[in-house]
Image (cartoon, helix red, strand yellow):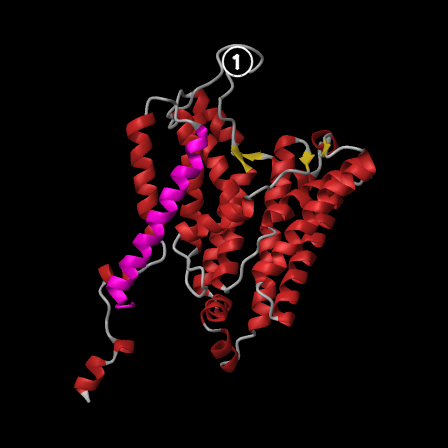
Amino acid sequence: MTDATNSDERIKEMSRLRRALIRPELGGMVGCVAVFTFFLLTASDSGMFSSTGVLNWSVVSAQFMIIAVGACLLMIAGEFDLSVGSMIGFAGMMIAIFGVTLGWPMWMAILVTFAICIALGALNGYIVVRTGLPSFIVTLATLFILRGFTIFIPQTLERKTIIGGITEAAQGDWLAAIFGGKVLKGFFAWLGDIGMISVFERGNKAGQPVVDGIPMLIIWALGLVIVGHIVLTRTRFGNWIFAAGGDAQAARYVGVPVERVKILMFMFTAFCATVFAVCQVMEFGSAGADRGLLKEFEAIIAVVIGGALLTGGYGSVIGAALGALIFGVVQQGLFFAGVESSLFRVFLGVILLLAVILNTYIRRLITGER
């Protein structure tokens, strides 16, 4: 009996090192170390790691992080959503139409936009689970539909595809401040007073800190990462997500509501895209029909860099966040390093390939997979 027990792979003890090496975050961790090392050596004196430089690449990383969280949970559940980029552009345009063109209170415009986009996410999920069609095809169709409406609606109502005036319309609005404001302003003013961070030396802002707070975009990104990680690793629903993507039929046999899980993940992905859109329009003060282009692929790449499998059932929200961090650091770091910006996607493609190869190799080495 003892020999049989010792030979059973299901209950074999695993060392901490072995357990660490098969974690999905490994590729993202290695990628982060490599990227930060590279830019510390090539751009350390360029201002990239000054307070303003850190804020720049943190904001860009947070943008990727918000949509990567939704894409990560959906991919672990075994599905894709290629309409994320178009959803961002559509949501931003709806806020502008409701809040500027129609003159609604901004809080109402934001809430109605969330309701519409989450409903569209539910529709995507419903079509996928009811028809059995690949989510790639269903959401590809949604991508074109939403992008078409994002161009058609403002052209019909305003005779243009860029609508401004959002900043003025959102002035004093409580919900707009949750997406477009800043926190810890007093703390950063204190840091400027004691000389910990740079301050403006002349002009109307003389004496004020160069970095006057943390944008709500970053707070939203961190909040979504924390909530997503807890749900995925500490709840029964998180187990359902893994089960739905790992083996949907087996999951059904043990009582997992696979269809409901997938629909909810499509809705959550739409929610994340809308959060991104609201933060974006509040930052720029306008909505454009071309916003969100290629964001769906960038989200998927961030998730894959973070260790998720394209086949579903395996991944990590923390890994996706690290993949998004790599995105932001590389995009801004190339500018600080004086490298031609067109090489950003080349650099990113190399990181993606290396991360996937490393994850695959280590997992096969440790688990004995072929």
Which x, y percent locates residue 339?
39, 26
Whether 354 is among the magenta residues is yes
Can residue 58 be seen? yes
Q: Considering only vertical position in the picture, is 281 above or below 148?
A: above
Q: State the residue lying farthest toward the left.
A: 3
User: At which x and y percent is residue 3?
Assistant: 17, 85
The residue sitting at the bottom extreme is 1
Whether residue 178 is visible, yes or no, is no
The quadrant of the rendering that contains the C terminus is bottom left
The residue at the point 40 percent across, 20 percent down is: 195
Q: Residue at x 46, y 25 (%)?
A: 190
**Under tag 1, what secondary structure?**
loop
Q: Is residue 350 magenta?
A: yes
What residue sits 36% from the left and 48% below the top? 353
The reply, left or right, for residue 304 in relation to residue 12 is right
Q: Residue furthest top?
A: 202
Give the amino acid at mark 1.
Answer: Ala
**Which residues are the magenta region?**
341-370
Res. 311 image quadrant:
bottom left
Q: Tell which of 241 and 249 is nearer to you.
A: 249
Count of numbered tags: 1
- The relative height of residue 155 versus residue 228 in the rendered view (above or below) is above
Q: Quadrant of residue 121?
A: bottom right
Q: Main secondary structure of the magenta part?
A: helix
Which residue is tagged 1?
206
- Residue 268, given in percent of the width and then of the height, sits at 59, 57
| For residue 148, side relative to residue 242 (left or right) | right
The quadrant of the picture occupied by the N terminus is bottom left
Could you say where residue 81 lies in the image, as x and y percent from the top left? 57, 56
